[in-house]
Image: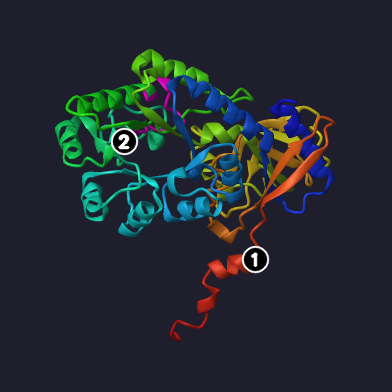
């Protein structure tokens, strides 16, 4: 059964159970397993590879645990992501810590745990000089190869002025000297960006860092591994996933055949390409109206779960499907209509003038390809709760089994987040 069929079965089953919340997320567990199989098979020609998932893409503990059971470790970039990954059973050598703003406490914790660290800058290296004794961690340096931007500037991290990593063209000699003075530095890290960065640009970044590793190793064998980052783009226009892992590895080897010579081990940090196609959001249509002759369907899915889509629709469009209240595809002529969210600003639209069968109250709107970033990157505008997330599997007979991943945030939890424990603490006005 393919991804589309599993999705249709899950939607019908969820609607048939009368969804308890006006909006919820769903994760295709079989789809994740298939994506992991594609990833590991594609990278086999490179030899020993530690695959990690970028926790920022979907930092839900059950999902990280599920991926961990499939052999995928985690890349973390904050104390919160680290804590969630550790709660999921991924810790020590199964974690890679990346962040441009690591505190001393974060570094000390990672070193004590044996977590790999990619230092972002020379000042962080100096901080590590004070903390490193006999390192259990693999320690590396993030390099900005300065190979240019992809289609989306905000997610391009290898520009001449990117905030991430040490710019290679500006600091090549200093980087080589930094390795010479620190024998515990054994890894180079590169990530040129995500979504909008084509595989060819990603390969250019890897080629630049591989050449740097060869230059460092010309004096003595020191760099033993290369963290290739992630960033493989996803096709949001259709069910077709876009560039495959096999396509990307072929591009890498065409650019740098020596990657397969066995002299380096590798790390990957994919997130969106592992998860996006394996999740979707479903929201009830609460009300409909017509303004200026244009139909508007008001749903519960807006910028709080889809901030990038709402604020930059030209870069982050989502495919939407209209279903009736029983989860069946809506029929009838398509009518351009706005799909609005619940937030109190006029631009809170999942889609503008989107041709769909005319929606009515009680219908369902499905936002596809939201398994990465949309569940975890909640925007707390209007104090709206984080939605429930459900995993699902579909048997050969088409029976759907749901597994809870996260319950919907309660009003009590929202009030606590709003500082309820300190009500009365401020002086009287």
Q: Is residue 201 magenta?
A: yes
**Left or right: 185, with 246 as reference point:** left
Question: Residue at left 46%, top 19%?
Answer: 45
Q: Position of residue 107 (x, y in %)?
A: 33, 54
Residue 287 appears in view? no
* Quadrant including the C terminus: bottom left
* Label drawn at residue 9: none
Q: How many marks?
A: 2
Question: Residue at left 78%, top 49%?
Answer: 19
Q: Is residue 208 magenta?
A: no
**Left or right: 144, with 90 as reference point:** left
Q: What residue would you read off at disc 2?
A: 187
Mark 1, secondary structure of its residue = helix
Question: Residue at left 55%, top 44%?
Answer: 58
Bounds of the magenta span? 187-202
Location of residue 187 with respect to 22 vertically, above or below: above
Q: Position of residue 75 (x, y in %)?
A: 45, 42
Q: Nearer the viewer, residue 175 or 271?
A: 175
Q: Residues within 10 Å of mark 1 (few under 14, many from 20)?
A: few
Residue 41 appears in view? yes
Q: Residues within 10 Å of mark 2 (few under 14, many from 20)?
A: many
Q: What residue would you read off at disc 1?
A: 411
Q: Position of residue 62 (x, y in %)?
A: 61, 48
Question: Residue at left 54%, top 27%?
Answer: 39
């Amino acid at each position: 059964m393919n991804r589309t069929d599993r999705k249709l079965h899950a939607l019908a089953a969820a609607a048939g159970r009368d969804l308890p919340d006006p909006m919820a997320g769903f994760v295709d567990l079989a789809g994740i397993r298939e994506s992991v199989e594609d990833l590991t098979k594609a990278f086999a020609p490179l030899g020993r590879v530690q695959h990690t998932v970028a926790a920022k893409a979907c930092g839900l503990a059950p999902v990280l645990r599920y991926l961990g059971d499939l052999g995928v470790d985690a890349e973390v970039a904050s104390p919160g992501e680290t804590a969630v990954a550790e709660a999921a059973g991924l810790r020590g050598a199964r974690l890679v810590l990346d962040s441009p703003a690591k505190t001393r406490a974060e570094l000390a914790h990672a070193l004590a745990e044996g977590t790999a660290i990619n230092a972002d800058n020379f000042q962080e290296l100096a901080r590590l000089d004070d903390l490193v004794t006999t390192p259990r961690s693999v320690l590396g340096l993030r390099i900005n190869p300065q190979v240019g931007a992809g289609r989306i500037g905000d997610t391009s991290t290898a520009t001449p002025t990117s905030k991430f990593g040490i710019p290679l063209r500006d600091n090549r000699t200093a980087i080589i000297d930094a390795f010479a003075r620190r024998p515990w530095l054994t890894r180079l890290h590169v990530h040129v960006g995500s979504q909008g960065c084509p595989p060819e640009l990603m390969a250019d970044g890897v080629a630049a860092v591989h050449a740097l590793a060869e230059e460092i190793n010309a004096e003595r064998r020191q760099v033993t591994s290369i963290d290739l980052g992630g960033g493989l783009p996803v096709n949001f226009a259709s069910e077709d996933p876009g560039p495959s892992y096999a396509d990307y590895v072929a591009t890498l080897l065409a650019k740098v055949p020596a990657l397969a010579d066995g002299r380096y081990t590798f790390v990957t940090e994919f997130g969106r390409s592992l998860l996006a196609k394996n999740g979707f959001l479903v929201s009830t249509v609460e009300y409909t109206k017509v303004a200026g002759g244009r139909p508007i369907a008001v749903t519960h899915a807006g910028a709080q779960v889809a901030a990038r889509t709402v604020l930059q629709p030209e870069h982050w469009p989502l495919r939407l499907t209209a279903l009736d209240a029983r989860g069946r595809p809506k029929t009838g002529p398509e009518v351009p209509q706005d799909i609005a969210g619940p937030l109190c600003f006029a631009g809170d639209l999942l889609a503008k003038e989107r041709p769909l069968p005319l929606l009515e109250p009680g219908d369902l709107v499905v936002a596809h390809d939201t398994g990465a970033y949309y569940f975890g990157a909640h925007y707390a505008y209007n104090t709206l709760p984080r939605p429930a997330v459900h995993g699902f599997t579909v048997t050969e007979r088409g029976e759907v089994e749901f597994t809870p991943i996260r319950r919907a945030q309660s009003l009590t939890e929202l009030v606590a987040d709003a500082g309820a424990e300190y009500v009365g603490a401020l002086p009287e006005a």
